[in-house]
């Protein structure tokens, strides 16, 4: 139901954008966001994309990034999404960037993932590797609701949308995402999956109004992906106690 | 505001006497100070108030030289290098901290702008924490450049908003709005400064020469956004927590009786990095970039989102926009 409504909204937006001739928008919508409309020109499976080794060590610039081909950011330029190296976690001075890193980092892989040294959503699933139970058990993935089997997963999002595991996860491999058109994506490519419904969010993300940019305002654009900030099963940011309040004094502070 | 330096004065012709040289007030003071310093050194051995160790003596000499230096804008490159070397040595002697003070200039073709998403900000105040650590803000007086106001839904009145909230956020029925120095294009604070200790750099950042500020606080009265902070006491930062990456016009050590304010993390942004607040924000509410680059994120936000600026009727032209999703 909501998908139908979103698709409707997408058509409307597409029409509006086509009218104003905003090329960057139109490309994103046509190619990525409307299943069945236009040809989905997204990369098939960019897990094998080459790593960029040109980054300088010592700053946040050591974030290794996988290129997002076929996606355009501000001004029609391509951009990269961030994946982090465990090496960087150890070497980065956490003092000034700790808040950022706490937000950005997940547990480093205990064993080398497909590409050694690189953080990835798939590689971080070392505590409970999904495939130790799920590989080859298609029926479980298709029929069960998320929360029934996993107490630790808060299935707010599936509850609200009525989604099944297999709406997002590939039925035969839980560590692969499956898109509406049947294409597959890795867990690092959550934006491809989320983009199918969350049109305005991913539009802002592609251009810089939504999501977190890393690595400085200058040079190549490096952004975090959806699941770096949002728990995919419970996407709303959780309330928390803020950093301490200021002592606001409009008059002078007494001098000792 | 021009940043041109004063042309160097030609050396006097040989044979010209000291009295015939064109001597400005500052140069005369320098000569005088040299004499005073020499005198103090001569007295050093017998006066109980004078320096007793080599270190103290060095601090005194360095402090003297610092006292008689010029305005940063009118210094030559060599003079800048000298004062930076002195300041770094003073930090080493006084606090035991090895700091690096930059004098990096503005990049050509760059004008900084900031956008703040009031739909996204959740009031976590992590930007404030990052700012305190990054900019060596006074821990004793709890100086903070950024304020996050908790606003009633639908309200736009900052006067009645609460910046001292201390409960779980985001609270129902509220939104959050952050303020800091907006780096106005027509800054009233610069216009009122009687000594030229604050000015606007070519990349749009309004900076303060802490060694030229006389602490009159006119700028604080002139600022309609309450962006400036005054040091009633010398700021206290535990040596362990001092950020050694510093800029002369930014987060270097301040002293008693000078004004300071947000400078868009000049030591970071001039090297292409994000300001600490933008990097710390976990919600992505803060967008920073180059206004002169038509492909930048901030330009996309300005072109495609509903934006407004605070107290726009004052015509201060802040380079800080608020926007909604």
Image (cartoon, coloured by chain):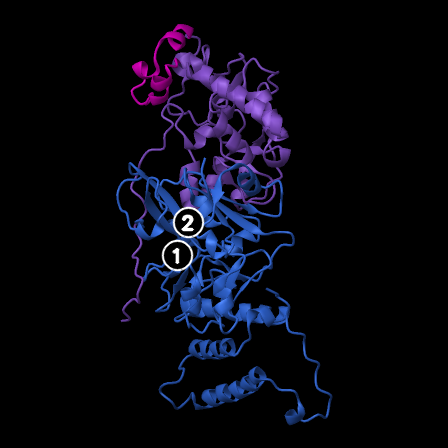
Chain colours: A purple, B blue
Please name whichever residue, B160 or B55, is drawn nearer the observer in this view of the structure.
B160
Q: Quadrant of residue A162?
A: top left
Q: Quadrant of the C terminus of chain B?
A: top left
Please rate how many residues cluster around mark 2, counting C-alpha atoms within 10 Å: few if below 14, some from 14 to 19, many from 20. Answer: few
- Badge 2 is on which residue? A95
Q: Mark 2 lies on which chain?
A: A
Tell me: A248 left or right of B99: left
Across and down, in percent, residue B235 comes to 37, 65
Task: Name the residue tied to disc 1.
Answer: B241
The answer to whether A98 is drawn above or below residue A22 in the figure is below
Which element is circle 2 on?
A: helix
- Is residue B215 among what the camera can see? yes
Left or right, A36 with reference to B15: left
Residue most extreme to the front: B313
Badge 1 sits on which subunit? Answer: B
Number of callouts: 2
Check the picture and name the quadrant holding the N terminus of chain B: bottom right
Counting from the top left corner in percent of width and height, residue A96 is at 43, 49
Left or right: A105, with B15 as reference point: left
Residue farthest to the top, as pictured:
A139
Task: Using the image as rendered, state which of residue A144 and residue B39 is in the foreground.
Answer: A144
For mark 1, give the secondary structure.
Answer: helix
Q: Where is residue B156 in the image (x, y as percent from the top left)?
A: 37, 46
| Callouts 1 and 2 close, C-beta under 8 Å | yes
Q: What stretch is highlighted in magenta?
A: A138-164
Picture coordinates of residue B193 (x, y %)?
A: 49, 70
């Amino acid at each position: 139901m909501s998908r139908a409504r979103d698709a409707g909204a997408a058509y409307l937006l597409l029409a509006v954008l086509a009218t104003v001739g905003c090329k960057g928008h139109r490309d994103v919508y046509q190619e990525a966001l409307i299943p069945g409309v236009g040809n989905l020109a997204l990369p098939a499976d960019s897990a094998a994309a080459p790593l960029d080794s040109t980054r300088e060590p010592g700053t946040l610039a050591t974030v290794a990034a996988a290129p997002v081909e076929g996606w355009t950011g501000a001004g029609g330029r391509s951009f990269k999404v961030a994946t982090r190296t465990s090496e960087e976690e150890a070497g980065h001075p956490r003092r000034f960037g700790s808040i950022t890193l706490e937000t950005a980092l997940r547990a480093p892989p205990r064993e080398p993932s497909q590409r050694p040294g690189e953080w990835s959503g798939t590689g971080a699933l070392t505590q409970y590797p999904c495939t130790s139970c799920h590989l080859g058990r298609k029926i479980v993935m298709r029929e069960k609701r998320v929360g029934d089997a996993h107490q630790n997963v808060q299935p707010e999002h599936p509850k609200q949308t009525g989604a099944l595991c297999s709406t997002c996860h590939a039925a035969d491999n839980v560590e692969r995402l499956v898109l509406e058109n049947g294409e597959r994506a890795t867990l690092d490519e959550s934006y491809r999956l989320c983009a199918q419904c969350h049109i305005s969010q991913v539009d802002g993300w592609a251009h810089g109004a939504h999501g977190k940019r890393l690595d400085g305002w200058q040079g190549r654009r490096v952004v975090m992906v959806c699941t770096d900030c949002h728990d995919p099963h419970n996407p709303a940011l959780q309330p928390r106690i803020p950093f301490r309040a200021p002592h606001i004094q409009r008059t002078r502070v007494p001098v000792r | 505001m021009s940043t041109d330096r004063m042309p160097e004065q030609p050396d006097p012709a040989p044979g010209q006497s000291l009295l015939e040289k064109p001597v400005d007030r500052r140069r005369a003071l320098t000569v005088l100070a040299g004499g005073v310093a020499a005198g103090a050194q001569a007295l050093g051995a017998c006066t109980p108030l004078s320096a007793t160790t080599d270190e103290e003596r060095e601090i005194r000499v360095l402090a003297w030289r610092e006292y008689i230096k010029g305005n940063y804008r009118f210094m030559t490159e060599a003079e800048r290098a000298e004062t930076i070397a002195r300041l770094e040595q003073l930090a080493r002697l006084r606090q035991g901290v090895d700091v690096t003070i930059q004098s990096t200039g503005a990049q050509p073709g760059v004008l900084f702008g900031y956008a703040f998403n009031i739909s996204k900000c959740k009031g976590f105040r992590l930007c404030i924490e990052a700012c305190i650590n990054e900019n060596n803000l006074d821990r004793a007086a709890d100086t903070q450049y950024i304020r996050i106001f908790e606003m009633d839904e639908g309200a736009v009145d900052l006067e009645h908003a609460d910046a001292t909230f201390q409960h779980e956020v985001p609270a129902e029925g509220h939104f959050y709005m952050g303020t800091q120095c907006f780096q106005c294009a027509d800054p009233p604070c610069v216009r009122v400064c009687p000594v030229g200790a604050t000015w606007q750099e070519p990349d749009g950042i309004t900076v303060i020469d802490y060694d030229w500020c006389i602490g009159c606080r006119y700028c604080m009265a002139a600022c309609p956004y309450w962006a400036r902070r005054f040091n009633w006491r010398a700021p206290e930062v535990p040596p362990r927590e001092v950020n050694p990456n510093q800029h002369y016009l930014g987060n270097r050590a301040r002293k008693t009786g000078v004004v300071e304010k947000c400078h868009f993390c000049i030591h970071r942004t001039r090297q292409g990095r994000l300001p600490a607040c933008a990097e710390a924000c976990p919600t992505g509410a803060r967008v920073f970039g180059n206004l002169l680059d038509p492909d930048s994120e901030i330009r996309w936000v300005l072109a495609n989102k509903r934006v407004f600026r605070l107290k726009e009727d004052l015509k201060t032209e802040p380079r800080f926009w608020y926007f909604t999703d």
